[in-house]
């Protein structure tokens, strides 16, 4: 059973969150990658500073979700929300942090005119992420990713 965490504050992503996100990513992936997160966070803050969010508990970043609304890609002309990165500090998993983040980002996408939200999940490596999105009501799409190894 998932427990909710009182005192969760969801707010827009800020450049000052980079070090906390780097630390969460390192706990999850086992890799220290500040340059990756500086580039990614810079991208999202330039595109739509309100779309990406972090969850704070007692002033500490416990999770983050990066995304944006785009149109005109992959034959999708209407504004479409894209959730591209999700990370929750392992110490806070099972406390509905991801759900709080998703609710906030989905509401922002609605306000920006999106009628659908998309994401990609590697089913072989991210079964837990697939379960998370399924619980939120996401379904497999007829759009399929194609990959060519170079």
Image: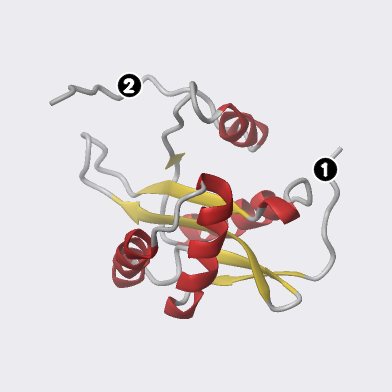
Local crowd size for mark 1, using a 10 Å CA cut-off: few (<14), some (14–19), many (≥20): few
Q: How many marks?
A: 2
Q: Is residue 126 left or right of residue 8?
A: left
Reading the image, the residue beneath label 2 is 144
Reading the image, the residue beneath label 1 is 2
Q: Element type at marker 1?
A: loop
The colour scheme used to paint the residues is: secondary structure
User: What's the residue at 51%, 46% (across, down)?
Assistant: 29
Compute the Cα span from label 1 to label 2: 31 Å
Along the viewing direction, whichever of 2 and 80 lies nearer the viewer: 2
Q: Quadrant of the C terminus?
A: top left
Q: Mark 1 or 2 closer to N-term?
A: 1
User: What's the residue at 70%, 55% (across, down)?
Assistant: 97
Q: Is residue 74 left or right of residue 126?
A: left
x, y percent for residue 78? 30, 45
Q: Quadrant of the N terminus?
A: top right
x, y percent for residue 80? 37, 46
User: What's the residue at 68%, 49% (across, down)?
Assistant: 99
Along the viewing direction, whichever of 69 and 88 lies nearer the viewer: 88
Q: Is residue 128 left or right of residue 119?
A: right
Residue at the outermost left position: 150
Q: Nearer the viewer, mark 1 or mark 2?
A: 1
């Amino acid at each position: 059973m998932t427990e909710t965490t009182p005192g969760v504050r969801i707010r827009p992503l800020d450049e000052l969150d980079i070090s906390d996100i780097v630390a969460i990513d390192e706990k999850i992936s086992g890799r220290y990658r500040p340059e990756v997160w500086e580039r990614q966070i810079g991208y999202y803050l330039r595109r739509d500073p309100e779309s990406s969010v972090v969850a704070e508990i007692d002033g500490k970043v416990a999770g983050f979700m990066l995304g944006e609304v785009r149109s005109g890609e992959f034959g999708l002309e209407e504004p479409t929300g894209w959730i591209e990165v999700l990370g929750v500090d392992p110490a806070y998993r099972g406390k509905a942090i991801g759900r709080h983040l998703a609710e906030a980002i989905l509401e922002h996408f609605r306000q920006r005119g999106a009628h659908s939200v998309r994401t990609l999940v590697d089913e072989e490596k991210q079964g837990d992420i697939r379960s998370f999105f399924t619980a939120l009501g996401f379904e497999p799409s007829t759009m399929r990713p194609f990959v060519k190894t170079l």
